[in-house]
Image (cartoon, rainbow, N blue to C red):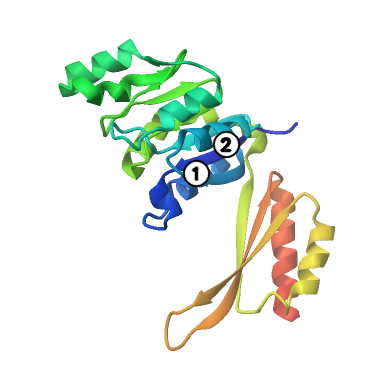
Amino acid sequence: MKGKNATIISVGNEILSGDVVDTNSTWLAKRLSTQGVAVEKIMVVGDDVEAISEVIKSCHSDFVFVMGGLGPTHDDVTREGVAKGVSKELERNSEAERALIERYGISGSLLKMADMPEGSEIIANPIGVAPGFWVDNIIVLPGVPEEMRGMFDGIASFFRDDRGIRKEGWIMTDKSEHEILDVLNEAVKEFADVKIGSYPYVDREGEGRSYKLRLKLLSADPDALNSAKRWLEERIRTC
């Protein structure tokens, strides 16, 4: 039986301009993958209500994670974009408003952070101020990495699917992809239950630099994984 899947959306002009590196998506994808949820897509969209709405409407994953744009400033429009994307009115959440007033003494225009699509459930922020929210299958979290990670940890148990959990193994080699291409192609046919990824990289340690290769093996069957790993290691060694 197929496991759950997810789409990750990061919001922010600063990411699109290259001013900020999107480490949030990488972190969240790894967490979801280790919990058995397969990440189908990772996307970045700017601080624009229409753009956020359209990308929300285009997603058909079991879960859609949206990160960034939950502050009180003029360019924090994620809540408006999500509301439009799920065809719901944006309204002041009384529970979130009360928490912002009583806990942080916030008032006036800063209470914009309590606005959420109707029917949303609050996601508590143990580190920062802005709360997240969960509406339908959309999970919305702040873009500050420490806040996002702390908030996800509080709800992580909802996104565990044992059907999708895979064991992984790694093989490191100094040989290039073209040197072991035939071996890789044969392995893919021989071990249909094992996903094999090939990741070249440049090793800059020591003098000069050299090209090396990492192979990642992924499978729900530990025996198949171990067999494929032994098979590949032997053939890479002798090819």
Q: CA distance from mark 2 to mark 1?
A: 8 Å
Q: Quadrant of the C terminus?
A: bottom right
**In this view of the protein, which residue sits in the foreground, 26 or 52?**
52
Residue 167 in sight:
yes
**In this view of the protein, which residue sits in the foreground, 147 or 223?**
147
Where is residue 137 shown, x and y percent of the image? 56, 24
Q: Residue at x 66, y 78 (%)?
A: 176
Q: Secondary structure at mark 1?
A: strand
Where is residue 58 shown, x and y percent of the image? 63, 34
Q: Quadrant of the N terminus?
A: top right
Q: Amino acid at mark 1?
A: Val
Would you say the residues marked 2 and 1 are in contact, meaning their CB atoms lie under 8 Å apart? yes
Image side of residue 195 versus residue 5, left or right: right
Q: Which mark is residue 142?
A: none
Tell which residue pokes out farthest to the bottom in this image.
207
Q: Amino acid at mark 2?
A: Val
Q: Which residue is mark 2?
A: 55
Where is residue 174 shown, x and y percent of the image? 60, 79
Q: Which residue is mark 1?
A: 45
Q: Residue at x 59, y 36 (%)?
A: 6
**In this view of the protein, which residue sits in the foreground, 66 or 115?**
115
Residue 160 in sight:
no
Question: In the displayed structure, would residue 31 be above or below residue 129?
Answer: below
Q: Residue at x 31, y 29 (%)?
A: 125
Where is residue 67 shown, x and y percent of the image? 43, 38
The mark total stands at 2
Please report whichever mark, 2 or 1, sits nearer to the chain's N-terminal start.
Answer: 1
